[in-house]
Image: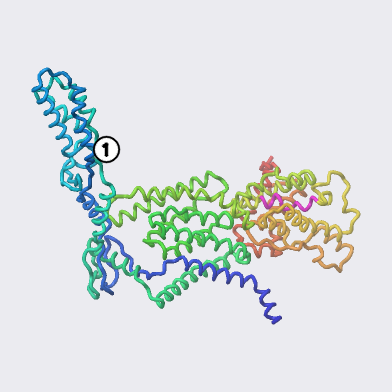
Amino acid sequence: MKNFINNFYKNQSLIYKAFLFVTTVILIVYLFPKGGVFKYEIIKGKPWQYENLYAPFDFAITKTNEEIEDEKERIINSVLPYFEFDVQISNQAKYGYEKAFAENLNVFDDAEIEIAAKKFGNDVLNEIYKYGVLIEEYAYNGDKMLFLSKKNKAEKIQYKKILTPKSLTQLIENRIDNSEYKDLRNGFIALFYDIVKPNVSLNKKLTESALNAELNKLLITRGSVTKGSRIIAKGEVVEGNKLQTLVSLKTEYESQVWSEKNYYWIVFGYGMLVSLALLMLLLFIRKYRNDIFENNTKVTFILFNLLIMIMITTFVVKFKTAYVYIIPLCILPLILKAFFDSRLGLFTHVVTVLILGFVVPNSYEYMFLQIIAGIVTILTISESYKRANLFISVGQITFIYIIAYIAFHIIHEGNIENIELFTIGLFVLGGLATLIVHPLIYAYEKIFGLVSDVSLLELSDTNSRLLKELSERAPGTFHHSLNVANIAEAAANEIGANAMLVRVGALYHDIGKMTNPTYYTENQSTSVNPHDVLSPRESAQIIIGHVIKGIELAKKYKLPDRVIDFIRTHHGTSTVYYFYMKEKEINDHIDSKDFQYPGPKPFSKETAILMMSDSVEAASKSLKNPTSTLIDSFVEKIINKQMDEGQFLNADITFKEIQQIKKIFKRKLTNIYHLRIEYPE
C-alpha cells in the first residue's frame, strides 16, 4: 500500500494528464452527432471517383430546396384568400340614405325630378355595396381570385371588383358625370362621403388556415429508389437527378434510427479518432515543448481552449448550420501564440479543425478554409501586443475566407453567379469577432496565471514600481540592465527569438542586487570596496546570493514565471571566477562548487541570449582602450568560454545563431564606445 501511495505521488502529474485527456475525449464525443456518417464525399459537377454505388435500402428522393420553395410559392399564389363583407355597415349606409339626401340635395322644386334623382343615388349606393369597400388595400393582383363571405355565403370573385378608396372616388365621379345630374355633382359627392364607409376586410385566420392546409399537403419527395438499384456509376458526373439522389441517400443514411448496439459502436469509433488526434497534440507538446508538457496548468489551458472552440461550433451547427463561419476559430492560434509560440498555436489549430470535420457539413471545404486562415493568422501576427497588427491580420483573414469561398463556389457551380452575400457577411462578422482576443488574453492571464506579450509590454515600462526602486537604490545596476536589454533585444531580433520577452528579462535579471547594491562595482561611487574586509568565499556567496534574492523579490512583486526564469538562469552554473582565483591563492584545496552559481542553465534561446548579453556587457567595462580588434576577440573569448562550459546545452540554440549573436554584440559594443576605423598615417 505504501509503495502504491509513493508511486501515486511520484506520477501524479502524469495521472492528472491522463485524467484530463480522458475527460476531454468524453466531452468532445458527447457533443458529436451520434448518427452514422456517410462515407462518400459528394462534389457537385465532378466525376464520381468511387466504385459503382447501389442503394443499400429503399429510400425516397427528396426535392431540392429550390423545388420546394417554387412549389410553396405556387401554393401561396393559388390559395384563395377569404374576405369578410360587413353587412351591418352597408345596411347603415342604406338606412341613412334618405336623411343624407335631404340634407345635401334639398334643391328640387319638382317632386318627380326629386324621386328620379333619389333613385339614381340609391342605384349608385347599391352598386358600391354590391362587393363593398376595402378597409385597407392588399398587394394582390387585380385578377387574383378570392372568396367574399356575405351572410354566411362565400362568393368567388376577382380582387379588383372590391372597391378601394381610390376606385370608390372614381366610380362615384364617373356615374355622376355620365348622368343628367352633373349640376348636382358636389351635392352627390358630399352625400356619398357622408354615408359610405369601408366594410370589407381580410379574414387572416381563415386565409392562413387554408394556406397551411395546402402547404401540409406539399410533398418533399419525388419518387423513390429501391434497394439494390444502381444510383451512380464510377466516372459519371455528379449533377442533376443523380446529385439529388446521392444527397437523399446521405440524408437518409445519417438520419436513420440506430440500434443500441450501433450507437455504442459509433461512440467507440468517435472516441478512438478523437483520442488519436489529442494524443498527437500531447506528443507534439512533449517532444517540442517539454517545458509546457511538464506544466499541468499550461496543458489544461491548451485543452480547455480546444474544447471551448469545439463546443461553440457544435452548438452553432445544431442551432443553424449556416452560421458556422461566424465563429472566430482563428482566436485559438492567436491566443496560443500570445502565450507560447506560433508552432504550437498552428498545430493545435489544425488538430481542432480535424476534429470539427466530424461535426460540420461540407467538411473538406470547412477544414481547408480554417487551416488556410490559421496559417495566415500565424504568418501575419508578428507582434500581437500592437493593436494595429491585429486589425491588419483580421482584414487579411477575412479576405482569405472570402477568396477561398468564391473559389469553391466556382468549382461547384461553374460560374460566379448566385454568390451568397449572406455567407460573405458571415465571414466579415467572424473576422470582426476575432478582435475579442485581447480581452480574452487578459482574462486568461488572471485565471491561469500566464503571461502574454501584452503583459510583457507593460512590464518593460521603466517607470514601473520595481524598476523605479532599482534605479534609485542601485543606479549602476539599472544602467547596466538597460544596456543589456538593448543588446539582447537586438540579438533576439537577429535570430527570430522573442525580443520583447528578452528585453523584459534583461530589465529585471539583476533586481536581487538591490539588497546589497554597494557590493557590486557598478554601484560603488567611492573608492571604498566592502569586499576588502571580507574573505573571497564570503564575497562569492554575496555575489551568488543576488540570484536567490532576485527570485524572492520577483515573487514578492508577482512577476510572471517566464520573467523569473531569466533571473534564475542568467549566470547558469558558471563560477565567480575572480573570487575563486583569489581564494585559490590562499588555499589550493578548495571545492569550485562553493564558487558556482546554483543554476539552472539557460533552457531557451531567450535565456541563452540574456546570459551572453549580461556577460559581454559587464565585462566590457573592464576594457581600458577598446578597439574594434580588441572587442572582436573579447566577445569571442567570453562566449566561447560559456560554450566550453556547456552553458547552452539545454537551450534550443544553434551554432549559426550564436555566430549571428556575436556579430550583433561586436557591432553594438563598437557603437557604444564610438570607435572609428583606424586610418594609416
Image quadrant containing the N terminus = bottom right
- Residue at image coords 62%, 72%: 14
Q: Position of residue 544 (x, y in %)?
A: 79, 58
Residue under pointer 1:
136
Residue in the foreground of this view, choosing between 53 and 216: 216
Depth check, front residue: 292 or 585: 292
Q: Along the horizontal axis of the image, is 198 left or right of 7?
A: left
Q: Quadrant of residue 594?
A: bottom right
Magenta span: predominant SS is: helix
419 sits to left or right of 164: right
Q: Which residue is drawn at 24% across and 61% down?
A: 219
How far across and how far down the image is residue 183, in percent?
13, 19
- Residue 238 visible in the current orientation: no
Name the quadrant containing residue 386. Answer: top right
Asked whether residue 508 is drawn in magenta, I would say: yes
Q: Where is residue 492 in the image (x, y as percent from the top left)?
A: 61, 52
Amino acid, disc 1: Glu
The magenta stretch spans which residues? 504-514
Q: Is residue 576 shown above or below 678?
A: below
**On screen, residue 543 above or below 627:** below
Q: Is residue 592 on the magenta stretch?
A: no
Q: In this figure, what is the number of numbered marks?
A: 1
The picture places residue 175, in percent across and down from the top left corner, at 12, 28
- Determine the residue located farthest toward the right in the rendered image: 533
